[in-house]
Amino acid sequence: MSASASEIGVPTAIAAFGGDGPAPVRIVVGYGFWIFLLSDIIMFSALFAAYAVLSGQTDGGPTPHSLFELKHVAIETLCLLFSSYTCGLGSLFIERRRLKLFFILFAATFALGAIFLSLEFSEFAGMLAQGAGPSRSAFLSSFFSLVGLHGAHVTVGLLWLAFMMAQVAAQGPRAYVLRRILCFSLFWHALDIIWVAVMSLVYLMGARI
Amino acid sequence: MIDSVRHSSTEDLAPGDRQSHSASIAAYTVGLGFALLLTAASFIVSQAHLLWEPGVAVGLAVLAIAQMGVHLVFFLHLNSGPDNTNNVLALAFGILIVTLVVSGSLWIMANLNGNMIPHSVLMEMQR
């Protein structure tokens, strides 16, 4: 092999990957998870469209205005917003290897998420007790599928969060653990974005109908 | 593993990655403040009679989109930097599909609604 091959061939091969070789695992993992989140948001958009079309079809049953309690919704919104904040700060501190602060902030995230879920469950239970279950009208079917799917995501997120805290406790802040925490915080922030749409379209608009 | 947190100005950023660590606590706090303000504005617009009645829906939609933007920029750290191009392009494609699904469904269903035979006429025909 001549000297010119190593001088010309290798830099060309590197240039094909965009400058300095293939992207680090963290970038690839984060990007892949970002694509998953976008597809999740597209799935939610179908349910949002269904709700927007069906929200007026109450079949003589309870209307959005009579069912929704905005004080409830305001507390739920604040819980999710502050849990997003604590989650972001927690993932920041684990990267700085400040484990104690990470555990405090992620425990706060878990607590706020759990308060959100319990409020949502009590809202659903109250509606079911009034006979306003998902089978009552097209409006309620689409309401329970949209808000229920978001609640299911939050439930999965809480399980994932508890799992990540256990993993950090057991294995420390290793590279793959940090990558999973990056993905979790992306997931949690995306759930908050979806909740903004739920709050505006379902609750705030609904309270006016 | 060396790939954990290696930031240089030439390499791509993972979604959710921030460029400097010192600025990011401040960024999260500013984002939280903006989000709280926009949430409060949404609740006020929907409850108080500040806006012209038919304009309230538009007002709520604008506030919601603004708040999603705040979340994307301050919590997910999406920006217009060159190392963020892939993430922003993927997001743009997602927004395109979401817009098509939502506005297309509303448009088609409104049209179908307009073309339906009114209930009273239908009853008349069955007689």
Image: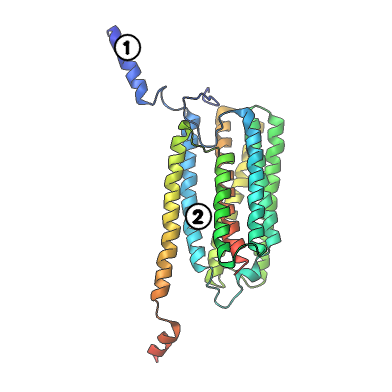
> In percent of the image, x 66 and y 49: which residue is there?
B37
Quarter location, residue A132:
bottom right
Q: Amino acid at mark 1?
A: Ser
Classify mark 1: helix, strand or loop.
helix
Q: Percent x, y for residue B78?
A: 52, 38
Whether labels 1 and 2 belong to a single chain: the reply is yes
In-image side of B36 versus A56 (left or right):
right
In-image side of A177 versus A107 (left or right):
left
Q: Which mark is residue B117?
A: none
Of B103 and A35, the residue lying toward us: B103
Cα gap from disc 1 to disc 2, whole angstroms? 52 Å
Q: Amino acid at mark 2?
A: Phe
Q: Percent x, y for residue A172?
A: 64, 28
Residue A9 lies, with reference to residue A118, above or below; the image says above
Write down the residue under mark 1.
A6
Q: Residues within 10 Å of mark 1 (few under 14, many from 20)?
A: few
To which chain does the residue with label 1 belong? Answer: A
Residue farthest to the top? A3
Q: Looking at the figure, which quarter contains the C terminus of chain B? A: bottom left
Q: Residues within 10 Å of mark 2 (few under 14, many from 20)?
A: some
> In percent of the image, x 48 and y 56: which residue is there?
A45
To which chain does the residue with label 2 belong? Answer: A
Write down the residue under mark 2.
A44
Q: Percent x, y for residue A106?
A: 67, 39
> In percent of the image, x 32 and y 11: which residue is there?
A6
Whether residue A40 appears in this view of the structure is yes
Whether residue A148 appears in this view of the structure is no
Residue farthest to the left? A2
Q: Percent x, y for residue A169?
A: 67, 32
Of B47 and A196, the residue lying toward us: B47
Quarter location, residue A16:
top left
Of A162 and A186, the residue lying toward us: A186
